[in-house]
Amino acid sequence: MRVGFLGPKATFTHLAVKAFFGDDVEQVLISTIPQCIDAVADGDIDYAVVPTENALEGSVNLTFDYLIHERPLYIVGEIVSPIEQHFMVHPSRVEEWENITRVYSHSHAIAQCHKFLHKMFKHATYDYATSTGAAAQYVSEHPDELVAAIANGLAAKEYGLKIVKENIHDYHYNHTRFAILHKTTTLDYQSKYLVADKEKTTLMVTLPSDQSGALHQVLSAFTWRKLNLSKIESRPMKTGLGNYFFIIDIDMMLDEVLIPGAIAELEALGCSVKLLGSYEAYSIKQGSLNYK
């Protein structure tokens, strides 16, 4: 089995892959989210793991837009991972880490560690990498520079760096949600490393363009059936201003009565409904990923 993920090695996406699949599968590094999705659609890999939402930054719009408009695949699983950022340097710089003049990481990671950086490295230069893993790789390959990376523990292990300050992120409830994508509706793999703690169904709903109160009627179709919605988000159809579709997460697996009944009611109202996936969601527990 081949599983693709947003590379390079030791990104948070890679960490999610290792937490769910372990080393039981061939792990394939891919440069971009669209290329991950294309690789599954073209049959080059079996599954792709891509980010869909961060607790601080919001939804990863590129993932859903590409799935909807370009290469439709099914969400067959979800992994929620804590984002634990550490400050790391080349082993040769451990004794002088407080003299670092340059901090290198993904823009989100630098923003998420603002308090620590403002206190300790107010006058340092902050440079942006394509990922936290890429930043760690750079620090590993440039021992002559007074540069540090902000990344996860897997990155420190993978690239031989020394963590000099752990958990420097501002908010300790920060998590990222990753989707496991496949060409069919089911995940033919049972994780030996994580246990599912939630069931979900994700729908794409397009409202009729000329009907007032349509969104209220859509929500009512779920409400009276006591179907809990954990997320509803609008995205542009890319067909003109004011044209939107909605991504809706329901907190249960697709059954034979309630969700099909809601879908039938929505279609009777003139809505277009597409199943994006019905799947189990897995959570990585805070502090469980120790790669030191």
Image: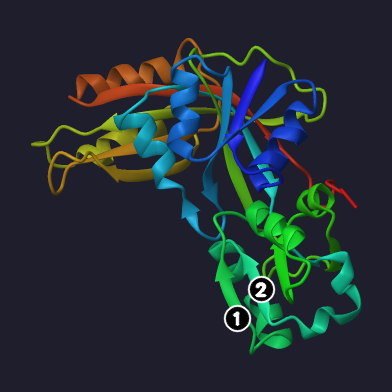
Image coords of residue 38 (percent x, y): 43, 26
Callout 2: few (<14), some (14-19), or many (20+) C-alpha neighbours within 10 Å? many
| Element at label 2 | strand
Camera-side residue of 180 and 220: 180
| Label located before the other in sequence (2 or 1) | 2
Image coords of residue 208 (percent x, y): 15, 32
Q: Residue at x 46, y 47 (%)?
A: 60
- For badge 2, the amino acid type reads Val
Image-based side of 150 in relation to 276, left or right: right
| Element at label 1 | strand
Q: Residue at x 83, y 59 (%)?
A: 161
- Quadrant in which residue 73 is drawn: top left
* Picture colour scheme: rainbow
Camera-side residue of 277 and 169: 169
Q: Is residue 84 above or below residue 196?
A: below
Furthest residue in direction left, as rendered: 210
Q: CA distance from mark 2 to mark 1?
A: 6 Å
Please give the residue where the numbered disc 1 appears in the rendered image: 125
Image-based side of 138 in relation to 159, left or right: left
What mark, if any, has residue 241 been given in the picture? none
- For badge 1, the amino acid type reads Thr
Camera-side residue of 18 and 148: 148
Q: Is residue 217 above or below residue 157?
A: above
Please give the residue where the numbered disc 2 appears in the rendered image: 103
